[in-house]
Amino acid sequence: MLINHQPAESLSVSDRGFTYGDGVFRTLRASHGQPRLWRWQWQRLAHDCAALGLPLPDVDPLLADITRVCAGIDEATVRITVTRGQGARGYSPASAPGSTLIVQASPYLAAPDSCFRDGIVARLCDWRLALQPRLAGIKHLNRLENVLARAEWTDPAIREGILRDSEGRVIEGTMSNLVICRGGALLTPRLDGAGVAGAVRACLMATLPLQETELRLDELLAADEILCVNSLIGVWPLARLGDWRSRSRTAAEQLAAVLAEAG
Amino acid sequence: MLINHQPAESLSVSDRGFTYGDGVFRTLRASHGQPRLWRWQWQRLAHDCAALGLPLPDVDPLLADITRVCAGIDEATVRITVTRGQGARGYSPASAPGSTLIVQASPYLAAPDSCFRDGIVARLCDWRLALQPRLAGIKHLNRLENVLARAEWTDPAIREGILRDSEGRVIEGTMSNLVICRGGALLTPRLDGAGVAGAVRACLMATLPLQETELRLDELLAADEILCVNSLIGVWPLARLGDWRSRSRTAAEQLAAVLAEAG
């Protein structure tokens, strides 16, 4: 692990990333020290830092950090965290003129092939995401909603939970973005009130005719295919969601091909 | 500083308090190692741990920790943080069977006497708090809303900002709870959708005929007195809020007397 480009094992407890969740992060896959979908990861990191007024790390030293923490790990899961650094007590960010950059790697743990091949079982979560337009889309460190939604089930056969917002709109999975295919059209929930806009979603939106939309539950359940996407799992088609059953694999294969091509 | 009752300087970066803001905290004042308003601090800590499914620390070792970190600091600001501890990657709290207890002290920095005597200048924040009934009232580590609201101003003459929720209801200050007095009646905003329910507020509600209410902005501005309360500042009456001016000091004196009595 590297903190501000130096080897480290632990973090100051006065870091605002810890005291207030005042920071952002990315989780990505790296192969032989090369981060996958880097263009989109970097785009999202830059967006999120700007949205919270955090300094964006320089890209070349960051890429060098990634290579360094991945040494000896052929396939790695990398987490990049940028916080507002150490500050005096109190919420004012003016007390923290610096920032902290943390880059960590661990071996990538691949899910079974069956997740893509056969599809996964998902559940509809009871948790309702709060509407906060000023934070929507940002992968910030305030992730209690995801934690508590994920706490709704422990059955390992259920691999993802689908989240709605307080108005009942379908937003995302607890750890993934959603894409649905209906009558050949690709749709993804609009994330202007809640949710995290991931790098895979950004890549797919730039590559495919993938339309953002407000998605009601009945519209989700009218889909031919429901797909969970993120940087670690790639694409997981849903086989089942309650009484809903997958009716096609066309979009799953199409999205997987796009991601394979994007590297 | 003590982490799990042991002297420590820093925290594991895989602690879920840092990775997801998965934890709660209290900030309080201690005099000669004795925490003030402890009954209410403890009540709120117990409430918040239960609400997030976090193990509640044992009270006696916690009090011993507070005494220990306050050694040599007559008047201290103490922060107690309880997180879900270290976990594997991923949101599921099932991966983190433990917890982390952090107790820190620093010298208490008293605000000028004029804050109580003359009242403070406050502003009305543009930031709107999201409605999340499942997290409302809890002093959890997801405090980006407070940070970004506090970032709206840097003028040191403005000591607090008043926050409304997305429906326009008045909720709290960025770092304090609100009490208003109108025609002799004491009111405080209901916190079932947003906000942090502090220990001073709990103490005042148990001691005075202080009524929780839904508070619209026009009702706030019809108050004779507006008071900000928390464990470090005690009571700060507002002198000014935009065009609003304080018209009385009765409640300020009454609340200050209650807190002095409560210890």
Image (cartoon, coloured by chain):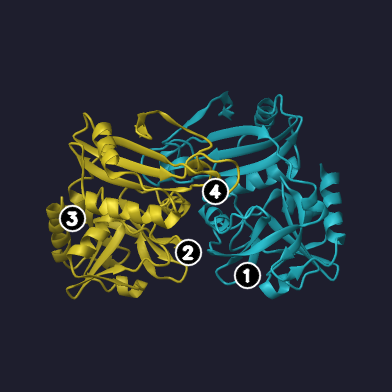
Chain colours: A cyan, B yellow
Which residue corresponds to the image point at 49% horizontal and 41% vertical from the top-left?
B18
Q: Can residue B204 be seen in this view?
A: yes
Q: Nearer the viewer, residue B99 or B230?
A: B99
| Disc marking residue B118 | 3
Name the quadrant containing residue B69.
top left
How far apart marks 4 and 1 lie (CA) works out to 27 Å
- Which residue does the numbered mark 4 point to in the structure image? B94
Q: In which quarter of the image is residue B63?
A: top left
Q: Is residue B108 visible?
A: no
- What is the secondary structure assignment of the residue under circle 3? loop
Determine the CA span between mark 2 and mark 3: 36 Å
The residue labelled by disc 2 is B132
Disc 2/disc 4 C-alpha distance (Å): 23 Å
Identity of the residue drawn at 86% across and 67% down: A184
Q: How crowded is mark 2: few (under 14 residues within 10 Å), some or many (20 or more)?
A: many
Distance from Cα at disc 2 to Cα at disc 1: 15 Å
Q: What residue type is labelled 3?
A: Asp
Residue A263 drawn at (x, y percent): 81, 41
